Structures are given as structure tokens and as C-alpha cells.
Amino acid sequence: MSGAGRQLALLLCGWCMAAAVPGGLAEEGCPAEPHQAARYVAAVYEHRSFLSPDPLALTSRKQALELMNRNLDVYEQQVTTAARKGAQIIVFPEDGIHGFNFTRTSIYPFLDFMPSPHSVKWNPCLEPHRFSDTEVLQRLSCMARTGEMFLVANLGTKQPCHSSDPGCPSDGRYQFNTNVVFSSNGTLVDRYRKHNLYFEAAFDTPLEVDHIVFDTPFAGKFGVFTCFDILFFDPAVRLLRDSEVKHVVYPTAWMNQLPLLAAIQIQRAFAIAFGINFLAANIHHPSLGMTGSGIHTPLKSFWHHNMESPEGHLIIAEVAKNPLGLISTGNTTGKTDPSHRKFLELLAGDPYSEKDAQDVHCDRAPKSTTNASPTFNSEMMYDNFTLVPVLGREGHLRVCANGLCCHLLYQRPTVSQELYALGVFDGLHTVHGTYYVQVCALVKCGGLSFDTCGQEITEATGMFEFRLWGNFSTPYIFPMLLTSGMTLETPDQLGWESDHYFLKKRGLSSGLVTAALYGRLYEKDSGLWETPPPHIHTGTG
């Protein structure tokens, strides 16, 4: 389903709406302040690519170009459509031109030669014969020029190297998974070579991380990275140390994994966490679990997730040049909110509200005994989560693992015939990548037994008003809120209170699938620690 047009969040003290204009552009409907008046039109295309029938087989450059030109023909059509609607920048997905599952040898005919944009000023559309094996770059350059828009695309590139280079592969060339950026006149502005490869034997990891920021006349600075990069400090977080980077372009070929890492889920969480616009283009192969693209701002998203349709999808939206952030610090709700008062009492260690595992009522006096249900363990995202079931119409739950304690203060208008659980994980994730996470997650389970908690589901009916929080030891926390039918929701409030990070939500549009605070401790990946970028708020103590 597409997510443009949903009503979104209460931001601090004021209401804010998001709407899509039927037959026109998706637009922001929040009251514009003078410094926010400037907007631009962005486009992302989720592409159902033509794939090689046998990516392991050796082929010729001519045959490789025949396949890639079929995909480029579709790109050209989308640029024409986007241009008619005033798009100033368009983003295409990772692997959209050449495909995937190649070996190092079999991908070679699909690779373009990539000169360094830092040392060579080049417009491939106007100078097509300057370098050989650049046919794909030439077509992309001409699309940008004809459409009069910035264009971001992903392709495979090659760079010869000499045996005197200690990093040079034995075949005498580097092969990179590369994003390219073209200006509206077709000039090659920059390139980014993917650093965090995801089981991509055909490509090399660059010897140094590319930290690529490009400037535009319509919206200022954009950062760029690819797919799996989003989970790591370099280059994704380091780019945002530059406070002038308010936008990110993100080609991806993402396989959805619920309940915590669906494509649109992590895209939106990144936009909220850093207070930026996030332009994400995914590949469209539902049979492989690959769908989910969007133009995400901190306050709302225009997204597409469709596991049924075989067709690609173009998203066009008008967004603010200077996006409003959602993150708050301290008590902005005030003492008139009863749920917030209870929250503050719990943080202060009120003896009537803080129990070992479960407190059905959290008020000035205890109204129920604790430990109505024991904690249990279940696998979620290949990690061993500790969970406690969510029972009754209201209550306060706490569940801990290692140093992280997660809390849930909730009310439910009715109790559905579904099992929900509050889960915690604080440890090193080691499947399909190695990285350290701290997670607090309220999830709908796949069935009514505890061992189904953590399974992938997309439909739910349970409605909640809740506050979720934890004593995280990292400032890098990605808030996730997903409801039935793969619907993105916006938190009413986020931020730090007494060294706890919290998420508050009332008025869900449909049944809750996942509400999570997904924390990343980058320093426990490799011993690296950096000062958070200016977009990130930390606890004030």
C-alpha cells in the first residue's frame, strides 16, 4: 500500500497534518514559518528490474548492455514523468540497472569505467567518447540533462589498479557498488562507493570510506550512502556531523525483515532520529521480500510498500528545504497530562509504581499484585529477546536484560484476541552482519503462544495508548512505529527524560504491529566512539 496522505503527529505543543493532493503532488500541510517556506520537489522510483536469467554465467559487454538498457529505458520514462510534475531530484534503487547475485567475474561486463569526479570535470552526455566503457553513465547523464533535474542512480563500476598498490586485487582492478550523482545539466557531480557490503562477492570494499556530500541550488547539501550502510556509523552517521546536511539520498536493495527492520520502517526511523529528509528508493521484487520506498521527513512520510503488485512505483512529494525535527528534550507535555505524571513518578522510583516485572495499575496506591505473568524468551530478528506478555486493559510493565530496562505504560480501549509482548535485547547481533544493539519493542506476536513473539506479521487489530521508554546507554536511538497493513505512524512525542529515552503515542490509525526504540552502540562494533552529530540529542541527567 502507499502511505501518502495519512494524518500525522502532535509535535510538542501543536498539531500538524500531512496530506496528499489527489492527482497531484504530496504536500506538507503543517503551518509554514518564514524560514520553512522554501520547498523542493523530490522523486524516488521503486523499480522492478529486468534481471539476468543466469547471473553466474559469463557474457559479453554487448549482451550486458542489452539487459541494462531495458532497465535504463524504464528509468528514462520515470524521469520524463517526474519532470512533468516539477521534480528537481530523482533517486533510483541499488542494483536497479545491472541486477544482483553475480560473481566477481560474471559481473565484469556490466561495469562502467568510473573516473574520479574530484579530479575530472565531465559531462558524459556532451562528451560521450572521452572515456570507454561508460555507456550507462552517458545515458544517466542525458536523462538528468533532458529532465533538468539532479539524478542519483546505482551501478557497478571498475577502476584499474597496479600491482604496486598493496590493496589491488589479483585481477588488476577494483570493482565497486557505486552511486552516482548528476546535476540538472548532466555533469557528473560525485560518486559514492558502498562501504558496508552485504554478502556482495562481486564488489570490493573501498580502502577508505567515502563521505560524500553534494550541494544543490534548490535545497542545499545532500548526503549519500547505500542500503546496509544505514546500520553503521560510517559513512551514514559521520556525514550528519555537518549540520548543513538536511537531506540524504539512499539507493537500496533491501529485503524486509519484520518486526524491526522492514525497509520503510528503518528509513522513517532514520529521518526522525536525525531530523532530516530521507529519499529512499528500493528495488521491487516482492517474491524476494524486496519492496518499500519513500520520501520521509521527521514529521511524515510518503511511502510505498506493496507485496502484491508486480509493477514499479514512482513517488513524488514536495518537502521543506529545512525540515522540522520531532525530537524533544525534557517535559514538554506539562503536568496536566495524567499519563505523563505517572511516567515521571515511575522515573522517580515511586514505590507504588515501580515493581519487578508487572504492575497492572500505576497510580498513587497499588491496585493489583505484580508478576501476573513471568518473563520468557523468544527469538526475534535472530536475537534472544527477554519478554513479558501485555495483559489487561492498562498497566505498567518492565523487562530487563543486561544493563537495559524497558518500560511500557499503556491503556487499551478494548482487549483484542491477540497476544502482545514487551521485549528487550541488549547485546551483539551476529546473524547477517555483526553490530551491537539495544532494543525496547512492543510487538504483536504471530499467535497466542509465547514462542510466536518475534515472528513476522503485518496485520493487527490491537489498539493502544502508550508510553515506551528505556535507560539506553547510547544517543543513537531509532524510533519505529508500524501499524496494520504496513502503515507508518508518527510518535506524538519523543525525547530524553531523566536519562531515559521515551516514545509516546495516542490515537493509532489501525492495530499496532510494532512500537520500538532501536538503539545502536557503534563503539561496541569496533571500539570506535565519536561525538554525536548536532542532529542528535542526548540525555541531560
Image: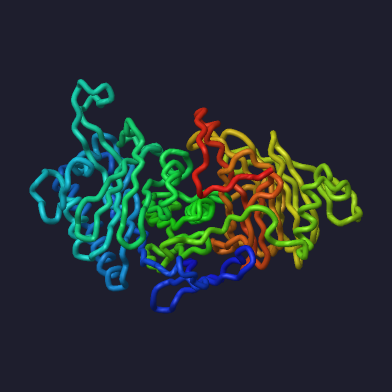
Q: Residue 7 appears in which quarter of the rendering?
A: bottom right
Give x and y (percent) for residue 469: 69, 49
Please state the total of marks drawn on the protein image: 0
Q: In screen coordinates, is 76 left or right of 234?
A: left
Residue drawn at the location 25% of the way across and 40% of the way down:
107
Residue drawn at the location 52% of the way across and 71% of the way down:
30
Give x and y (percent) for residue 293: 43, 58
Look at the image and tell me in which quarter the C terminus lies.
top right
166 or 39, which is in the foreground?
39
- Give the colour scheme of this rendering: rainbow
Q: In screen coordinates, is 451 left or right of 524?
A: right
Give x and y (percent) for residue 392: 80, 58
440 or 256, which is in the foreground?
440
Residue extending furthest bottom? Answer: 22
Q: In screen coordinates, is 165 left or right of 235?
A: left
Q: Residue 317 appears in which quarter of the rendering?
A: bottom left
- Residue 56 visible in this rendered orientation of the protein: yes
- Residue 52 visible in this rendered orientation of the protein: no
Give x and y (percent) for residue 235: 41, 40
Residue drawn at the location 61% of the way across and 43% of the way down:
380
345 or 508, which is in the foreground?
345
Q: In screen coordinates, is 147 left or right of 493?
A: left
102 or 41, which is in the foreground?
41
Residue extending furthest front? Answer: 34
Decide: is 341 above or below 378: below
